[in-house]
């Protein structure tokens, strides 16, 4: 009977973890370049069931009984998000597997959020204010320059003359981990290679691949599953109470 309590409790914990992931996705459904997280689960350790053939002997196996569910892993869904046209000369979207290099503190992180800006110090930055790096891993500064644009090869132009080139890398997404909502860090000791054929689509943005309506439907499903597991836990608790209070009177 206690196993029923553990199974129901594990179901509640699993649904709670899934709810947190879904809520994060819904919250970032309008975040440029966001990639949604997905979660998988696996059965908790199964228990072998044996047929008893005597007072102290163990008989043949008759199967297994599950003891609940547990979180397996959370992974990034790298499916491309929808492309929208903005006609902003500093907005860019990238080819599959390509990322912009940005300076975050003393580290180089990577992003697909192409809504770039010029900050108060005349640096080319992300929407969150992180410096975009050139091919020499230096911040791109356009002080004193006019008519700043970007071409499809990642060249930063002033009055149509190139002054820098954005560092665009071709990353193995299996070796990237999230850091924040739109930045990724490499888990490999090998430097992330430069993209051999960088192709930016100017005046467009890749939107989040999280669908808000789909996420809300999943959240409702998760909430109901949590309630069902909670009711099962309450039922098991009541059975245990009866077992300890009523059976003892027999």
Image (cartoon, rainbow, N blue to C red):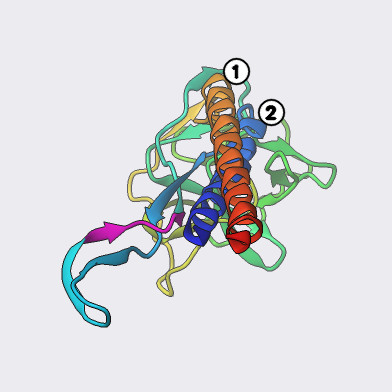
In the image, what residue occupies the spot 48% across and 60% down? 3
Q: Is residue 37 above or below residue 205?
A: below
Left/right placement of residue 111 relative to residue 128 reads left
Q: Is residue 228 above or below residue 49?
A: above
Left/right placement of residue 133 relative to residue 3 reads right
Instruction: Report which residue position mark 1 lands on.
Output: 86
Instruction: Give whichever of 123, 75 is nearer the camera.
Output: 75
Instruction: Give whichever of 240, 45 is nearer the camera.
Output: 240
In the image, what residue occupies the spot 58% across and 50% down? 239
Instruction: Report which residue position mark 2 lands on.
Output: 147
Q: Which residues are magenta?
A: 63-71
Quadrant assignment for the C terminus: bottom right
In the image, what residue occupies the spot 52% across and 48% down? 11
Q: Is residue 15 above or below residue 167?
A: above
In the image, what residue occupies the spot 42% across and 59% down? 67
Left/right placement of residue 221 relative to residue 52 reads right
Instruction: Give whichever of 147, 171 is nearer the camera.
Output: 171
Farthest right residue in view: 120
Can you give x and y, in whole percent of width and height, for residue 233 in the image?
Answer: 59, 47
Instruction: Give whichever of 221, 108 is nearer the camera.
Output: 221
Can you give x and y, in whole percent of width and height, for residue 152 in the image?
Answer: 45, 33
């Amino acid at each position: 009977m206690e196993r029923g309590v553990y199974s129901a409790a594990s179901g509640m914990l699993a649904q709670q973890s899934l709810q947190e992931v879904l809520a994060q996705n819904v919250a970032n459904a309008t975040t440029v370049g966001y990639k949604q997280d997905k979660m998988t689960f696996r059965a908790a350790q199964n228990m072998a069931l044996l047929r008893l053939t005597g007072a102290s002997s163990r008989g043949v196996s008759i199967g297994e009984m599950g003891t609940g569910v547990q979180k397996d892993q959370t992974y990034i869904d790298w499916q491309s998000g929808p492309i929208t046209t903005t006609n902003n000369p500093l907005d860019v979207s990238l080819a599959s597997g390509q990322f912009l290099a940005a300076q975050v503190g003393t580290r180089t992180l990577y992003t697909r959020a192409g809504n770039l800006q010029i900050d108060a110090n005349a640096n080319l930055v992300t929407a969150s204010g992180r410096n975009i790096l050139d091919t020499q891993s230096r911040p791109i500064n356009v002080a004193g320059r006019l008519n700043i644009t970007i071409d499809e090869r990642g060249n930063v132009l002033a009055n149509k003359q190139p002054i820098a080139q954005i560092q665009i890398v071709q990353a193995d997404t299996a070796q990237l981990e999230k850091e924040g909502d739109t930045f990724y860090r490499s888990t490999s000791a090998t430097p992330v290679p430069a993209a051999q054929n960088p192709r930016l689509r100017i005046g467009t943005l890749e939107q989040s691949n999280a669908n808000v309506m789909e996420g809300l439907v999943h959240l409702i499903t998760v909430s109901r599953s949590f309630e069902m597991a909670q009711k099962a836990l309450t039922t098991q608790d009541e059975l245990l109470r009866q077992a300890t209070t009523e059976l003892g009177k027999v």
